[in-house]
Amino acid sequence: MAAAGALRRHGFDGRLSIIGDEPHRPYDRPPLIKQFLAGEWDADRLALPGADAPDLDADWRLGVAATGFDAATRTVRLADGEELTSDGVVLTCGATPRSLPGTQGLAGIHTIRTLDDATALRDEVTRTTGPVVVVGAGFVGAEVAATCRTLGRDVVLVEPLAVPLARVLGLEIGAVFADLHRDHGVDLRLGTGVERVAGDGNGRVARVQLADGTAIDSATVVVGIGVRPSTDWLAGSGLTIDDGIVCDASCTAAPGVVAAGDVARWPNQVFDDDVGRIEHWDHAFAQAEHAAESLLAGDAAEPFATVPWFWSDQYDRKIQLAGRVRPDDDVVVVDGSLAERRFVALYGRAGRLVGVLGMNRPRHVVQLRPRIAERITLDEALALFA
Amino acid sequence: MKVVVDYDLCESNAICMGIEPTVFEVRDDDFLYILDEHPDESKRANIEEAVRRCPKQAISIIEE
């Protein structure tokens, strides 16, 4: 949808088809595990206004999956047998949640990606009792845990690493989230994974056995252990697939074919040797707009160089992070303190500023975001707070 | 044009400030302030970008 809007803004007046396997018009995903799961918002409030813009003039193909693609002729094959051939294709097919091995077909096991996924979980958490087990303390798991606690449900949060969000934010900042969740009554089981999930004999989950020998009786398990790019349908397309659709710096995957969002793997020139996918809301919009521009520009397409940005809401805390950080980066708190859970932290790597994290401190994150692209050093960034 | 923010939706993500700091400012109290409700037409492209990129869809433009 963002790419379609950008194509129109840049004067493309040809036929525009938007294909999606979900039956719904484009909607906003971040509230699914927050306001929607909490019952504060209904599905109508999730609608994205851009989808209904009259100047979009799109041919919507909703509820029909794309099942095959030929990059040489730019032909998309649909599940209903139809084939669409076009001058240009924007691939924004996203990613699919990873499932827990051995849980296929078991009721009460949830992954959350779509409105239908979130509706199923909401129906369950509002009408059942007993603990909700959340597997994986990444951003999805941490937000689901927070919302379920807000609803008054007992929550057991299981994470193989030592603290929540360790894979992204590192141990020191992750520990802040461990305390945050404990203070809100979450039963944290850190440093252990799921050994086995047992059913009740009637096709429903009944017990989660952990690797540390303990077990939790639960009829509702939410699995947030990451996603994999949705590229199965592109087998044999002629595109290079390697943890996503491999693109050049301009997000171009083949002549007349561009990709954006969770599924696109491209070299981001802001960071050295950074070739990867980014799974953020803001990034999906920004990259889709750029990919649309690349499609129209053809050989004159410009690199998409960006400082990624995302936010997460848990209880009354909001964090925002700009940059590309790794768990082993140097972390310096420059404003506020971890103890009061209101702070700004800088992430440095080899002397360069690579990230800015704010917890309930939004201003500095946005102000330093362009400075990261300017490649300022960590010392230069520290001097701004001296 | 007039720039309007729905403060019931705004969560001070400050994306708008990153795009057009002469119109949008998140201050030390973490609230968003509109510095110029009637910005010059030359800023229209940036303000439209801020409308599109707001994570809460809290910004709108009213034509006058």
Image (cartoon, coloured by chain):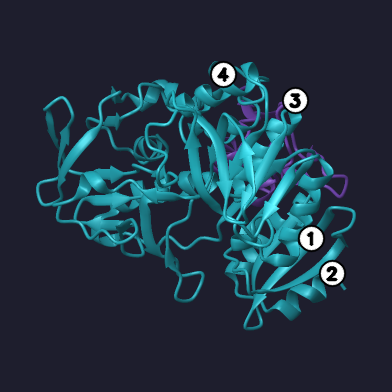
Chain colours: A cyan, B purple
The residue under label 3 is B8
Residue A141 picture location, percent across and down: 60, 44
Please determine if labels 3 and 1 lie on a single subunit.
Answer: no
Query: Residue furthest toward the bottom?
Result: A350
Where disc 4 sits, the SS reads helix
Residue A370 seen in this snapshot: yes
> Which residue lies at the image location 69% right of the left edge and 55% below the top edge?
A366
User: Given this view, does label 2 or label 4 mark the residue nearer the observer?
Assistant: 4
In the image, residue A73 sits, relative to residue A352, either above or below, namely above
A58, A219: nearer the viewer: A219
In the image, residue A155 sits, relative to residue A41, either above or below, namely below
Residue B53 picture location, percent across and down: 56, 40
Please determine if labels 2 and 1 lie on a single subunit.
Answer: yes
Q: Amino acid at mark 3?
A: Asp
- Labelled pair 4, 3 in contact (Cβ < 8 Å): no
The answer for how far apart the CA atoms under marks 2 and 1 are is: 10 Å
Residue A356 picture location, percent across and down: 69, 63
The quarter of the rendered structure image containing the C terminus of chain A is bottom right
Q: Amino acid at mark 2?
A: Phe
Q: Quick one: label 2 or label 1, which is nearer the N terminus?
A: 1
> Which residue lies at the image location 24% right of the left edge and 61% below the top edge?
A299
Q: Chain of mark 4?
A: A
The answer for how far apart the CA atoms under marks 3 and 2 are is: 32 Å
> Which residue lies at the image location 78% right of the left edge and 39% below the top edge?
B32
Res A123 label: 4
Please determine if labels 1 and 4 lie on a single subunit.
Answer: yes
Q: Amino acid at mark 1?
A: Val
The quarter of the rendered structure image containing the N terminus of chain A is top left
User: Given this view, does label 2 or label 1 mark the residue nearer the observer?
Assistant: 1
